[in-house]
Amino acid sequence: MIYFLKTILLAGLKRRGITLVTAYMILLLVSSILICLVEPQATALTHFGDALWWSIVTSTTVGYGDLYPVSTAGRIVATILPIFMGIGLGAAFITHMASHLIERRDKKMHGEKPYKGSGHILLVGYTEETEYLVEQIQKDTSHEVREMVLLADLARHPLPEMEHLIFVRGRPDKIQAQNRANTGEADRIIIHTGSDEQSLFALINALGLKNDGCEVTVRCLSSQSLDTFSSVPGTFETIMQMTAEMMVQAMQDKVHIPLQILLRNEDDNEEIYYVVVPEVSPHLTWWDLHNYLKERYGYLSFALAKENGQVLVNPDVKEPVSKGYGIWLIALDRPMNLVWPS
């Protein structure tokens, strides 16, 4: 209600609205003075306070009937000023207000209005995963009512039904667009444009605009781009291709294992490999296999894929392992000619 009244007030004080409001105030003043002058003495409308009340309720067509002119001259004043001119000005003002509200909503839907708030989560870029990413952020109770600003080069708001999500139109890699999204006042920035090149330029600009307490997370799609992202000066976190849940966790916890380190270890050339389990002992468990691979080959296994497609990261020690299961492990060289426990 307060927001609606504020909008009406602002609309009334802009452009044509101020003229209409001023004209209406003058109309009320003139009609109140005239009715006081033309009405017979000792009648109600000879008092200015009562005359002003009568002018207001008459011009707004409320017409309680508690006060009314008794003379012919008073009825003429009532016909010309409060009724005729009041209804006309009132209709013009209401039309102006409706037009302003529609224009305001249209600008919001097209992202034309700059964001003036602070402490928001800024999402830079839009992909097919953005909606799910917003849902995951809002699931966190500490962020469910925090405003999020989506900066994307789109014609219209892509997710208008989502609460607390404000759309700002512009290219994510442009400083002008990031200024319109108030990057300098953001609390968190997540950059995921769907293009490593655009994300890189968006990152550089965001680091130059953000405040000292703002945390930045950028998503890298290709391992070949990691060196380029790593060369950018500043404090930020780069994550490789991840699910929306993992991106939110990276943003919140900041203690996850960076996959880019596992994928690109320049010191010892460790890599992540995937191998399929052949015929093994029917009583083999995950922990038995984990220890066997570590002791015999120096491999570190960390995830198991079942035949039904289910993936278990750090499985239970008693999880059975059968033929056809997949194992993710970290090794210096590609595992070949393995001798499996039987």
Image (cartoon, rainbow, N blue to C red):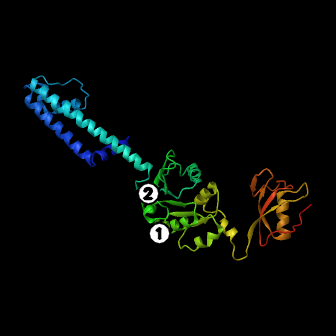
Mark 1 Cα shell of 10 Å, populated few (<14), some (14-19), many (≥20)? few
Identify the residue at the far front of this view.
Answer: 155
The amino acid beneath tag 2 is Ser
Q: Which mark is residue 223?
A: none
Camera-nearest residue between 243 and 142: 243
Percent position of residue 122, x then y: 50, 58
For the residue pair 23 and 329, the one nearer the viewer reads as 23
Check if mark 1's residue and mark 2's residue have beta carbons within 8 Å: no
The amino acid at mark 1 is: Gly
- Visible residue check, residue 311: yes
Residue with the mark numbered 1: 208
Q: Position of residue 270 (x, y in %)?
A: 74, 72
Left or right, 341 with reference to 252: right
Q: Nearer the viewer, residue 208 or 19?
A: 19
Tell me what residue is drawn at x 82 percent, y 56 percent.
325
The residue under the point 45% across, 65% down is: 175
Q: Secondary structure at mark 2?
A: loop
Rendering coords of residue 2 (x, y %): 37, 43
> At x 16% / y 33%, what residue is drawn?
49
Q: Mark 1 or mark 2: name the one nearer the start of the chain.
A: 2
> On the rendered image, what quadrant is the N terminus found in?
top left
The residue sitting at 51% across, 44% down in the picture is: 161
Q: Quick one: quadrant of the C terminus? A: bottom right
Which corner quadrant of the image does residue 255 belong to? Answer: bottom right
Residue 53 visible from this viewpoint: no
Which residue in the protein does label 2 denote? 118
